[in-house]
Amino acid sequence: MHSSLRRLGALLSGMLLYCVVMLCVSTLAALPSPAPLLSQLGLRALLAQEIGAALLLAMPVFGLALVWSYLTIRPRQRGRRPTTAWCLGGLCLAWLFYGLVHASENSALGELPLSTLLLSSSVPPLWGVLNVLAAMLGVVQAGTLARRWMPPTATLAPKVA
């Protein structure tokens, strides 16, 4: 029973993580464009600037997903396993539903360039592939850390007097 509740909690946490990540990304995307900074770094082409801006937005997403999912999936007791797959499943499920609902409402998506569809944080259904990949990598990395730092299981060896 306890493991089922942990799995359900990780699934719901993954879905909530997606909502928080998209709120964070939409807030960051509303800030002024980093194009002058990227051009000073040597990125002159428009596609290179779009990729650079998408990477700048993906970095805080990775950090947020890493901390959030580590706190969600780490086992609190001995012998428990991290619930990484359930958290990742919740993230993907929310991404799929939210993206499909917005894509079905907007019929002008077919007219946008492919780079805008893939990299822009304000265009459904992908909402920036790098943002989604950063969130997924954050969850997977948190699962790796949770497994590595998992409390040791109790050994059943008899005590020697």
Image: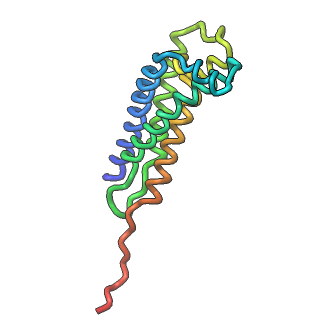
Please indicate whether residue 31 sits to the left or right of residue 78 in the image: right
Please indicate whether residue 116 sits to the left or right of residue 3 in the image: right
Please indicate whether residue 77 sits to the left or right of residue 113 in the image: left
- Relative to 5, is 114 above or below? above
Q: Residue at x 44, y 42 (%)?
A: 87
Q: Residue at x 43, y 37 (%)?
A: 64
Q: Residue furthest left?
A: 161
Residue 136 is situated, as x and y percent measured from the top left of the image, at 52, 38
Residue 131 is situated, as x and y percent measured from the top left of the image, at 53, 30
Of the pair 48 and 138, the residue shown nearer to us: 48
Q: Residue furthest right?
A: 45
- Picture quadrant where residue 134 is located: top right
- Relative to 40, is 16 above or below? below
Figure coloring: rainbow
- Relative to 22, is 135 above or below? below
Q: Quadrant of the C terminus?
A: bottom left
Q: Residue at x 34, y 85 (%)?
A: 158
- Relative to 21, is 139 above or below? below
Number of marks drawn = 0
Q: Residue furthest bottom?
A: 161
Residue 142 is situated, as x and y percent measured from the top left of the image, at 46, 48
- Picture quadrant where residue 110 is located: top right
- Picture quadrant where residue 14 is located: top left
Residue 157 is situated, as x and y percent measured from the top left of the image, at 37, 82
Of the pair 1 and 82, the residue shown nearer to us: 82
Q: Residue at x 63, y 23 (%)?
A: 40
Of the pair 153 and 44, the residue shown nearer to us: 44
